[in-house]
Image (cartoon, grey):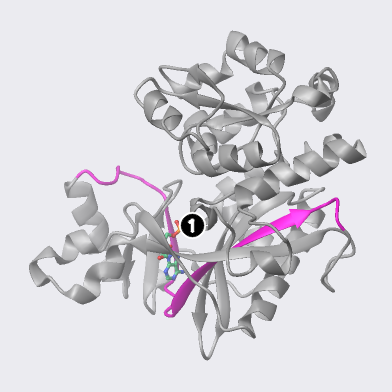
């Protein structure tokens, strides 16, 4: 991994009055640029030629400057990185940024200062590490099954490394597991020897709360002795499987797809906010223990609520999630923290702005 000192050396050479927030034009980039502009930052969009004019078509959210690439891997090239550094670019990573450039590449080859803790890339991207993290946190998680033979209830099967729900399926017995795996292989949807993660299918209502952890503000919840934990919104993901109730028996297979296609806003019954904040604080606390300084900035818990089991957390996203795109003008929760409309994109920019004012920008970059 590129030593933090090297990244901070680069950051030290930046002209603080001219820092620009940069990201790939995808995922939540419009929100990030929009928020950055509101907080007085210049913005840089990294884009493929096709997307360029469309991203530029938004007067209030399009990037001020565009750097074109034919392939996102070009971002790792020496010339490209040097260009970003010359521009005083501070990268705001989002889900697609990590996916397109590659977590390993970001750690080993990318020295441009990036908001947040790069160590989370390891802990977020590896399902086994996530399991250790959530167990350390002490939040309720789905039971994991080591082998298909152990399946004794409804399980959801995730392909190792697969993101966003593609190729997931459910099974209730070892026989059903093997028959579905065979079927997926026949249809070339998985490769021979592909690794799977088998976990208990949790029935209930899914909620995806978005949090921001500020290291610059005072502690505000009992589990944390420093840093302010903010609940900035909640979404629900729209997955093809959600449409099943419409019942097309002959289209059943196609409807068993957990790929996220969009998001819809949600709130929880007010008393559940306590459960969500408590779980989030525990996840932060565990992150500090496992990979100090732990979570910094935006993150999201993927949860399922069932009246008799409470909230089960099945995944953590350790960066801005696309569900925050719902709340460009703030969410039902943001007025409890801020007087002005506060999106997650703007919240990130605000944190950077505050850090600059306090001479603490290095505390946000690891
Ligand atoms: P993930 O890739 O873990 O974000 O999961 C994608 C989708 O699969 C989620 O948004 C849920 O709809 C579903 N899912 C994942 N894990 C579980 C689980 N343990 N129980 C029920 N549904 C799940």
Q: Where is residue 210 in the image (x, y as percent from the top left)?
A: 60, 61
- Residue extending farthest to the top is 79
- The reply, left or right, for residue 188 in relation to residue 7 is left
Q: Is residue 1 magenta?
A: no
Residue at point 84% right, 58% down?
227
- The reply, left or right, for residue 187 in relation to residue 27 is left
- The reply, left or right, for residue 7 in relation to residue 33 is right
- The answer to whether 264 is drawn above or below residue 74 in the figure is below
Q: Which quadrant does ligand 1 occupy?
A: bottom left
**Residue 330's quadrant in the figure?**
bottom right
Q: Position of residue 217 (x, y in %)?
A: 86, 56
- The answer to whether 72 is drawn above or below residue 220 in the figure is above
- The reply, left or right, for residue 364 in relation to residue 81 is right
Q: Mark 1 points at which residue?
A: 326
Q: Does the magenta stretch include residue 202?
A: yes
- Residue extending farthest to the bottom is 308
Residue at point 76% right, 46% down?
351
Q: Where is residue 251 in the image (x, y as percent from the top left)?
A: 12, 64
Residue at point 66% right, 52% down?
298
- The answer to whether 167 is drawn above or below residue 202 in the figure is above
Which residue is at the front of the view, 42 or 316? Answer: 42
Where's the C terminus, which quadrant?
A: top right
Q: Does mark 1's beta carbon lie closer than 8 Å to ligand 1?
A: no
Numbered disc 1: secondary structure? helix
Residue at point 77% right, 40% down?
352
Residue 252 visible in image:
yes
- The answer to whether 330 is drawn above or below residue 149 in the figure is above
Where's the N terminus, which quadrant?
A: top right
Q: Where is residue 196 in the image (x, y as percent from the top left)?
A: 41, 54
For the record, the magenta segment spans: 188-217
**Residue 42's quadrant in the figure?**
top right
Which residue is at the front of the view, 272 or 88? Answer: 88
């Amino acid at each position: 991994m590129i030593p933090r000192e090297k990244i901070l050396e680069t950051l030290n050479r930046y002209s603080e009055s001219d820092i620009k927030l940069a990201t790939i034009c995808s995922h939540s980039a419009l929100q990030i640029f929009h928020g950055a502009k509101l907080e007085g930052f210049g913005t840089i969009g990294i884009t493929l030629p096709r997307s360029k004019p469309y991203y530029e078509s938004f007067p209030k959210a399009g990037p001020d400057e565009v750097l074109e690439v034919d392939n996102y891997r070009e971002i790792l090239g020496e010339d490209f990185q040097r260009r970003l550094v010359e521009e005083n670019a501070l990268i705001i990573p989002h889900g697609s940024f990590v996916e397109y450039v590659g977590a390993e590449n970001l750690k080993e080859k990318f020295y441009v200062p990036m908001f947040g803790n790069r160590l989370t890339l390891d802990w977020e991207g590896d399902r086994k590490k996530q399991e250790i993290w959530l167990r350390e946190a002490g939040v309720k998680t789905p039971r994991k099954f080591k082998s298909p033979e152990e399946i004794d209830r409804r399980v959801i099967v995730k392909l190792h490394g697969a993101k966003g729900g593609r190729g997931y399926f459910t099974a209730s017995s070892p026989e059903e597991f093997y028959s579905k795996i065979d079927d997926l292989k026949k249809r070339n949807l998985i490769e021979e020897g592909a690794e799977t993660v088998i976990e208990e299918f949790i029935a209930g209502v899914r909620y995806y709360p978005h949090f921001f952890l500020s290291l610059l503000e005072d502690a505000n919840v009992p589990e944390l002795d420093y840093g302010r934990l903010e609940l900035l919104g909640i979404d629900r993901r729209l997955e093809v499987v959600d449409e099943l109730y419409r019942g097309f028996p002959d289209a059943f297979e196609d409807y068993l797809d957990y790929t996220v296609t969009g998001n819809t806003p949600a709130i929880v019954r007010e008393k559940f906010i306590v459960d969500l904040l408590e779980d989030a604080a525990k996840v932060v606390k565990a992150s500090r223990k496992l990979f100090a300084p732990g979570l910094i900035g935006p993150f999201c818990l993927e949860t399922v609520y069932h009246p008799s089991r409470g909230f089960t957390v099945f995944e953590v996203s350790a960066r801005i999630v696309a569900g925050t795109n719902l709340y460009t003008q703030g969410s039902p929760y943001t007025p409890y923290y801020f007087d002005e409309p506060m999106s997650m994109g703007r919240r990130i920019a605000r944190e950077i702005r505050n850090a600059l004012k306090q001479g603490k920008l290095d505390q946000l970059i690891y």
